Amino acid sequence: MPLWVADMDFAAPKAVEKALQQLVAQGTFGYGIPPSGYFSAYQGWQDRHWGTKFEEKWLSFSTGVVQSLVDLLHCFTEPDDGILIQPPVYYPFFDSIKETKRRLIEAPLQKVGNSYRIDFAAFEAQIIEEKVKLFILCSPHNPVGRVWQEEELHQLLAICQKHEVVVIADEIHRELILGDQQFVSAITVAQRLGIEKLIVLDSPSKTFNLAGLLLSHVWIPDLEMRTTYHAWCRQYKQTEVNCFGLTAAKAAYESGDQWLADLLSVVVANEEMIRQQLQEAFPKIELLPLEGTYLLWVDLRQVIAKERTKHVIQDTAGLAVDYGEWFAKDGQGLIRLSLATTPTIIQQALDRMIEAIKKEERHDD
Ligand SMILES: Cc1ncc(COP(=O)(O)O)c(C=O)c1O
């Protein structure tokens, strides 16, 4: 049962389907430019949700956040430069740094009680010691589910500013905020602090299940950095994005609000179901609070020997999940589950997981 990749089992909003059908019916698919009103649809969405202020001139399109990350590493750093990340974190960050031959520097998050926190002193010490040039922020944070608060972002960005570290904020999960949490964009905090060396990456792909349409945004407020980036892209003759991605995203930003609210309530209900049943069966399983994303971070180390996790979850339960060691060196024994599916599938997964862990316990006896 696939609960690993971060996309959903739900159809995109109806308005998206309709807009794509209209595009198909028109029958011509020549080179395109962003449809008129694209930026105002995006900004309108931001105004209705988090109030983040963007300017149209900051925007470049890309085919994906990870692709942009690699482009930006090439563009703003040199081989062997130190690039800082905060494990446990989305594993393509590690790959992008290694594959571009930059130096991978880690400032791991700290688990304090049942939540993850930033050790600001260790973060700054790594920047100084390793002469870090660029920091990749994941906000909200995949896989630990934290929605970084304004104060936390303020501290991070202020440290980066002090040491002239460029910040790339990956905000792909920015709309997937659960409960009472408020999302604050790094761009808002940077505006307040007068920070220029910041790039924000986002995309409609996670929010509206559009990953296959290959459309994402690169927001670069600083003119000099934007000029450097554009020159870099020109050099590689990067193609513009495709008309389907633009059409779908515009429709989603214009009228995907209720669809998103419904999605988030399913995610919350799925989380409650897992929390209740897993903790009833195994009180020692630790489920980290899910503030944002639809990806639940589960610590199985108190109930399964960590080197047996894959055997129990994959071979016995038949679940495909993401494993903790993909996100951090010391992550073995944790798993990440995607909750963007139906309660029926979650229930089946739960039944299989509970049975598999019980079988493992009997095996231990
Ligand atoms: C934090 C984060 N960034 C980027 C991506 C992938 O983005 P893209 O498909 O646009 O490369 C994901 C997908 O799960 C993600 O969780």
Image (cartoon, rainbow, N blue to C red):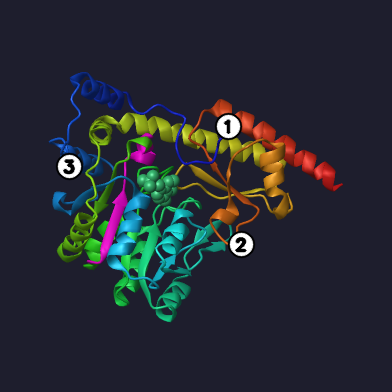
Secondary element type, mark 1: helix
Which amino acid type is marked by label 3?
Phe
Q: Where in the figure is residue 143, as x and y percent of width and height? A: 50, 51
- Specify the quadrant of the image occupied by residue 329: bottom right
Q: Is the residue marked by circle 3 packed among few (<14), some (14-19), or many (20+) residues within 10 Å?
A: some
Viewer-side residue, 351 vs 50: 351
Give yes or no for residue 200 being in the magenta stretch.
yes
Q: Where in the figure is residue 244, as x and y percent of width and height? A: 26, 32
Which residue is tagged 1?
Answer: 346
Q: Are marks 1 and 2 in contact (CB under 8 Å)?
A: no
Q: CA distance from mark 1 to mark 3?
A: 37 Å
Q: Quadrant of the N terminus?
A: top right
In the image, the segment drawn in magenta is 196-211
Disc sitting over residue 39 in the figure: 3
Q: CA distance from mark 1 to mark 2?
A: 27 Å
Q: Nearer the viewer, mark 1 or mark 2?
A: 2
The residue lying at 40 percent from left, 73 percent from top is: 80
In this rendering, position of residue 41 left or right of residue 101: left
The residue lying at 23 percent from left, 55 percent from top is: 233
Mark 1 / mark 3, whichever is N-terminal: 3
